[in-house]
Image: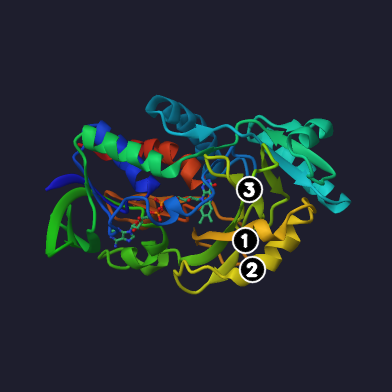
Amino acid sequence: MTDVVIIGGGVIGLAIAREASRSGLETIVLEKNERAGDDTSSRNSGVIHAGIYYPENFLKTSLCVKGNKLLYEYALAKKINHKKYGKYIISSNPSEEAKLKKIFKQAIKNKVEIYEADSDRVKENNPGLIFKSALFSPSSGVIDVPEYVTALEGDIQHFGGLISLKTSFLSAARENGLFRINCESDQKFSITSKFLINCSGLSSEINLSSIAGFQKKDIYKNYYAKGHYFKYSGKAPFSNLIYPISGQHSLGIHVGFDLAGGMRFGPDIEFVKKIDYSFDENLKDKFLNSISQYWPEINPDKLHPDYTGIRPKITKPNEPMQDFNIQTKNHHGLERLINLQGIESPGLTSSLAIGKYVNNLLMQDVQ
Ligand SMILES: Cc1cc2nc3c(=O)[nH]c(=O)nc-3n(C[C@H](O)[C@H](O)[C@H](O)COP(=O)(O)OP(=O)(O)OC[C@H]3O[C@@H](n4cnc5c(N)ncnc54)[C@H](O)[C@@H]3O)c2cc1C
């Protein structure tokens, strides 16, 4: 018998568990993998976003803007490796100028710090970059995700919570006002809990369909949008994150960094049918073509396969961007069940803010 069971030990489940256990709720995280944060949470750009692109009334915006500040504060307090690189969003041709202006206006509406960049300064810090004009976002940066995951795990344990690794959620049903949750590690067992929270990312659709009473109409179908990253060997000529104008479903093949200063490019986007992290090396030409639009001096021999990630989308390729979906009983009718779906980018940035948001929902219902 416990207060809260969380399905999924990615950054979202861990950030919620940190807040819940800090509030005095006995909390258990179920994570099927050997380590926490090994799925989408480790297969991303590691960028701390500013909250520029999304409509001002989206949860994505408010949680990203809050999460950005919280994540920098947390990284400082916990000595997590991170760097505020700053980011340039660049237009490469006249047709992208209007899009850049639109992004600028949206950032202002979202109350995000943004500037029209001084071209000489951009070139000075990023020699070889070809662009027409650029915006500068000073609060964009990069965080070491494994260190962040470890810090969250430490906090959860400190506040008395439990992360049960190699433990799969199988099914749940309500019994006498509580959840009976069936799990499997070495053997099958069940837990009784007052609250159940689903944040199982790419597997959320299948897990939700195993919760008795959760109606099919309330479950978003999961669409898998795969992205590849290529790393660039040798010294990075750029000092800032560089983002070309984005598409509908991704932020374009951008320039990112690891915290050792190594430069990488990606992710691209392709909707796939199953979760498969294999790397398609044939994409190198597509990457070279795209990168050389803004960096013609790229040396193809220095571009090497790195890793892939899969965005947990709840939209089809031709549908417009969706907000984070955080459902309570008001949406699905089940008391004390909180369901998170579609927590794609900027989920890493927003994680601490999502933790607080969901904990507030829990506290409204605690007796
Ligand atoms: C290519 C790419 C680039 C991105 N770039 C950025 C970025 O730069 N900045 C940013 O802010 N965000 C970025 N994101 C988004 C960010 O990575 C995600 O929003 C975030 O990691 C989601 O975390 P999560 O905890 O919801 O999911 P996950 O990390 O996937 O965690 C879900 C967990 O649930 C577990 N699970 C599933 N089913 C079960 C079960 N039955 N029993 C037990 N456990 C289960 C899984 O094993 C997994 O560990 C990017 C995402 C992608 C794919």
Label disc, if present, on residue 97 of the rendered structure = none
Residue at screen point 44% across, 36% down? 353
- Which image quadrant is residue 160 in? top left
Confirm or reject: label 3 Cβ below 8 Å from ligand 1.
no
Q: CA distance from mark 1 to mark 3?
A: 22 Å
Question: Callout 3: 10 Å neighbours few (<14), some, many (20+)?
Answer: few
Q: Secondary structure at mark 3?
A: loop
What residue did someone put label 2 on? Answer: 283
Confirm or reject: label 1 Cβ below 8 Å from ligand 1.
no
| Pick the front one: 96 or 337 | 96
Dot 1 and dot 3 residues touching (CB under 8 Å) = no
Label disc, if present, on residue 268 of the rendered structure = 1
- Residue 126: image x %, image y %? 74, 39
Which residue type does callout 3 highlight?
Gly
Please name which of the two marks, 2 or 3, marks the residue nearer to the observer.
3
Q: Tell me: residue 322, above or below residue 91.
A: below
Please name which of the two marks, 1 or 3, marks the residue nearer to the observer.
3
Left or right of 134 on screen, residue 155: left
Q: Tell me: residue 99, above or below residue 159.
A: below
Label disc, if present, on residue 234 of the rendered structure = 3
| Pick the front one: 11 or 214 | 11
Left or right of 252 on screen, residue 150: left
Which residue type does callout 2 highlight?
Leu
- Residue 170: image x %, image y %? 23, 65
Question: Can see residue 40?
Answer: yes
Which badge, 1 or 2, comes first in the chain's sequence?
1
